[in-house]
Amino acid sequence: MIDTNSVSAKFKKITGINFKNKDLLIEAVSHRSFKNDVSYQRLEFLGDSLLSFFTSEYCFKKFKLFNEGELSKFRTSIVNRDNLSHVFTKLNLSEIVLLDRKSFKEDIPPSIREDVIESLLAAVYIDSGIRNAKKMFKIIIKNSHSVSEEFFAKNQLQELSLFHFKVLPEFTTEALGENLFKCILFVNGKYYSEAQGRTKKE
């Protein structure tokens, strides 16, 4: 028998979000391999669309100097399977996922991790509306893979260049080897600076 109160309490501890309809939460974390009448597949369908919308809205407002291509690249860095699997792991959601453990001899597959993040977002939206859904989305952003940090660093650089030089900067990024990058900065077409780091953000 599923202890709905225990699952709800663990989810609240992880996210700070309380479910009124605990059966909806159970549906959101139930894989079809689990002996249950419901699974998260329908919620995952809605959650996929919600995540794409929230991410699009977020980057549109956050990165005012980014063009369409840069906005799309940021959105992809958030909604892709690798990142959502990473978020799942950081939040330790394996504690509340319901699935037939015998069917997965090793770890929970990335595809399931991705689906659970999306289904939970949808379940929160249905249970308590857009305000809490956006709270859940912010948790996803906060725990996203470091690849998204590159975009925040680039946005900050653009704002500084506009403030000091009244123009957007140009820069090139080159991979020098494993875990080593070089970025060269140009302002008004002139070489301005360069730096190396273990990540593009550095």
Image (cartoon, rainbow, N blue to C red):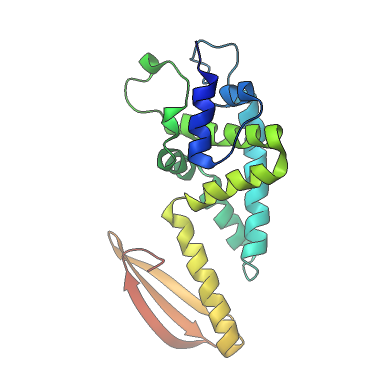
Vertical side of 194 occupied by 66: above or below: above
Residue sitting nearer the eye, 92 or 56: 92
* Horizontal arrangement in the rendering, residue 126 relative to residue 23 (left or right): right
Q: Quick check: 78 above or below 59?
A: above
Q: Residue at x 66, y 49 (%)?
A: 54
Q: As displayed, is residue 15 above or below residue 95?
A: below
Q: Residue at x 67, y 41 (%)?
A: 50
Between 85 and 7, the one nearer to me in the picture: 7
Q: 47 or 178: which is nearer to us?
A: 47
Picture coordinates of residue 99, whole percent (x, y): 46, 19
- For the point 62% across and 87% down, the residue is 166
Q: Quadrant of residue 118?
A: top right
Q: Nearer the viewer, residue 182 or 152?
A: 152
The residue shown at (68%, 55%) is 57
Say if residue 40 shows up in the picture.
Answer: no
Q: Is residue 188 left or right of residue 195?
A: right
Residue 180 lies, in percent from the top left, at 30, 65
Q: Position of residue 82 (x, y in %)?
A: 45, 43
